[in-house]
Structures are given as C-alpha cells and as structure tokens.
Image (cartoon, rainbow, N blue to C red):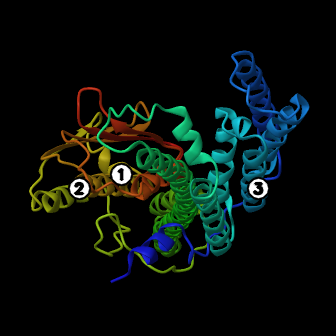
Amino acid sequence: MPSTSQRALTWFGVDDDWERPRPPVGRQDVVLAASVEAVSLLALELVRSAGGLDHTDAPVWSQWLAVSTGAALLLGRRRWPLLVASLAALHMFVVGVTMPQVMGQVSLQIVYFVALLSGVAWARDRRAMVVVIGTIVLVMFAWITWQFAVGSAAQDMIDAMDAGDRVGFFPPIPSAVAMTLLVNVIYFGGAIVGGGVSWRAARQRLRLQEQATTIAAQAGRLREQAVVDERLRIARELHDVVAHGVSAMGIQAGAARRVLDRDPDAARTALSHVEDASRDAVTQMRRLLGTLREGPGDGTGDGTGTRTTDAAIGDLPALVAAAREHGLAVHLDVVEAQPDAADRLPRGIGLAVYRTVQEALTNVRRHSTADTVSVVVRVDEAAAYAEVEVVDNGRPRHGTSGSGLGQLGIRERAATHDGQVDIGPRVTGGYRVRVRYPLGVS
C-alpha cells in the first residue's frame, strides 16, 4: 500500500509523463501584471495616508519599486513558473527584512500567492517542481521560526499587549506563534494545493480533448466505411438485377430469331421485350456505384448475412412475420393506386423498399422501446412514385444509442434512386422513417 508521501507525489504528477504546454508571455499576462501593479500602488498609498507605514524608514521610491517589481513577476508566471516562484520567494524575504510593513500589504501577499500557485500549476518538470517549491516552503518556515526564536517578533508582541490582561484560554505568546504558523500553513498550503488542482484539471481537459478527437476520427472513418460498404452492396445487388435483365434479353432475342421467318408478330413481341429489358438494364447500369467486385461482408440490416437481391415488396410479409417473432406488433399495408402496381415496380425500387423496411425494423428492435410498428407502402403509377413509411410508438432506449450507420445506409440507397428521405421523431410521439422513390427515373 503506498504511503501518504507517495500518494501526494502521485497526485502532483511527479511520475506523470504529460507536460503542460507553456504559452509565451501574452496580452493577458501583461494586463494582469499592469492591473496588479496599479491596484498595489493605490493600496500602498492608501495605507500610507491612513498611517499604516509610520514605522517604515525606507524611502517612498523604494517602496514603490518593491511593489512594482513584485507585480512584474507575474508577467512570466506561466512561461517560467519555477523561476518566477523562486524570485517571488526571494522578493518576499528581501522586502520582509528591509520593509516588513510593505511586504505585509495584501496586494503583495496576493502576488506571492499567485506566483507560488503558478509554479505548481505550470511546471513541466514535476520533480523539479517538488524540489523548488519544497525548498521555498522550508526556507519561509525557517525564516518565521528564526523571527520568533532570535528575532524581535516575540518582543514586539509583548510590547504591543498589556501583560496584566489575559482574556483567552491560551497564553498570549504561544497563541500568537500558533496563529502565525496556522496562517502560513493555510497560505502556502492553499497555493500548493490550488496549483496541483489547476495542473490536474489542465491534464484532464487535454485528455478529454484527445479522446474527443479520437472518437470523432473513428466515427468519421466508420461513416466513410459504412458508405463504402453500402455502395458496394448496392452495386452488387444492382449488378445482379442488370445481369438478370441481360439474361432475359438473350432469351427473348433467341426466341425472336427462331420464329422470325414463320411468325413475324411473335418475333416483334420478343424484340419489344428485348428493347424494354435493354432500356432498363442501361438505366440500372448508369446507377452502379463503385466497383462491382465482391467485397467483404454481405450482411444486411438484420444481421442475417444473406443476400436478398431478388427481394421486393412481395417479400415484405415474410420480413414482417420475422419481426413479429421478436415481440413486435407489426402491421403491413400495401396501398396500390392501380391494380398490381407494386408487382410492376422496377427491380431496383422494389429492392430499395424492402431494404428500407428491413433496416427500419432492425433499428426499432435494437434502439427503441416501441411495441407497435406500422409499415405502409404506397405505389401510384399515375403520380409516378413509390413510398414506404415505417412508424413506431416508442422512444429511444437508454444505453442503446446507435452509430447512425443504418440510417446512413437508407439515405445512401435512396440517393441511388433519387429518393427523398424523412427520418426523425414525430411531434405526436414515436419515430418515423419515410422514403419516396420517383418512378420513371430508376
């Protein structure tokens, strides 16, 4: 078990590799030093006018010099913290010996306090900080002890009080000594502890900034990877769709060749099918994203890892049934403005609708408190659109916040077909995922 001294050294960062950056002397340092000097000189003259410096024989200019040089030390308190702390201790000793009443002014005491605190807070070499600050404290307390032991401090107290009166529980001289020691312990201890707290807070802020930067960079890489993976998956699926169209073109062309001489009408019908299939294949090919090679991981939004490149609106009942097995009450409604309009959707659009519902249901199961989900698919060939809307009645589940990559995949897929996406919480409660795909474009 570490000792108290070891814990204290650890708290002050003696064995810590982090070095606090030391900024150059800047505007705020100049403003601080100038403000302290102005206030200190004003306070000095107010004390002199009130008769508080009657026992000081030093010339006025030397008193002003003492106050000004003390304030000037604050210029380098962040740039050269240990040097400033040492010079402040020397300043306190010299002024205390030659002009004790000037040294005792509150303004100079604040200067010494800030210099000592800055030495602890801004020192880069923590071991050197312990040595320098420890030496300063030992010298200061040795000076106080000397004042009472062989100096005139005790005699001054005796002369200032009436020896015949005793109003407290303790003798006067021991009380005065104890009070002096207590005040100095609080003074120096407060500066040292305050500096340590400042140093630790700066280290924590920097580490939090580094962690935030790392998290942001990782999130950015994940988003980029998600976009790449989604585009590869879309490209493979669209490739399968186009391959199916090309195969159909080959079959129809072969049939037209066989009946061209004996049944021209049948040949024309087959060739018209070839024309339609080729037009659809060219349209789909223009929308291929990225390379068509197989990439790692063919997983879908539900985590099954299967490629359902032939999935369409007709496969939604099976998808809904699977979601119901997880405890969700899912209602599916396919609204067709024209009979069998959903069956006539282009393969890419049908697959996009399926994937959108698949990802939305997965997000509900993982990240929502919902127990009821409504899935509505609307197809209107006259208005030239197909729309899918997934609405739940839940709230985000605590501790399960997602990365947003699923929604990114929905948006990426919709962008492939020039679709419009509306994802977010509803004013009346619950969450909605709605995507509208234009027909005649895909």
428 over 66 or under it: above or below = above
Left or right: where 409 falls relative to 40: left
Mark 2 or 3: in front is: 3
Which residue of the protein is positioned furthest toward the front in this rendering?
A: 164
Mark pair 3, 1: CA separation: 79 Å
Alpha-carbon span between mark 2 and mark 3: 84 Å
Q: From the top left corner, tell me how far across and down residue 38 is, in percent.
A: 79, 26
> Would you identify the image quadrant in which residue 403 lies?
bottom left
Q: Amino acid at mark 3?
A: Leu
Residue at 80%, 50% in the rendered image: 76
Instruction: Tell me if label 1 and label 2 are in contact, CB under 8 Å.
Output: yes
Mark before the other along the chain sequence, 3 or 1: 3
Of labels 2 and 3, earlier in sequence is: 3
Q: Looking at the picture, how far across and down is residue 117, in whole percent?
A: 62, 52
Residue 217 screen position, x and y as percent: 58, 62
- For label 3, the residue is 90
Residue corresponding to mark 2: 316
Q: Which residue is mark 1?
A: 353
- The CA span between labels 1 and 2 is 9 Å
Q: Secondary structure at mark 1?
A: helix
Q: Amino acid at mark 1?
A: Val
Q: Nearer the viewer, residue 77 or 258?
A: 77
Q: Secondary structure at mark 3?
A: helix
Which labelled disc corresponds to residue 322? none
Percent x, y for residue 44?
Answer: 75, 26
Q: Is residue 44 positioned above or below 121 on the image?
A: above
The answer to which quarter of the image holds residue 52 is top right
Q: Is residue 262 visible?
A: no
Residue name at image x 28 percent, y 39 percent: 431
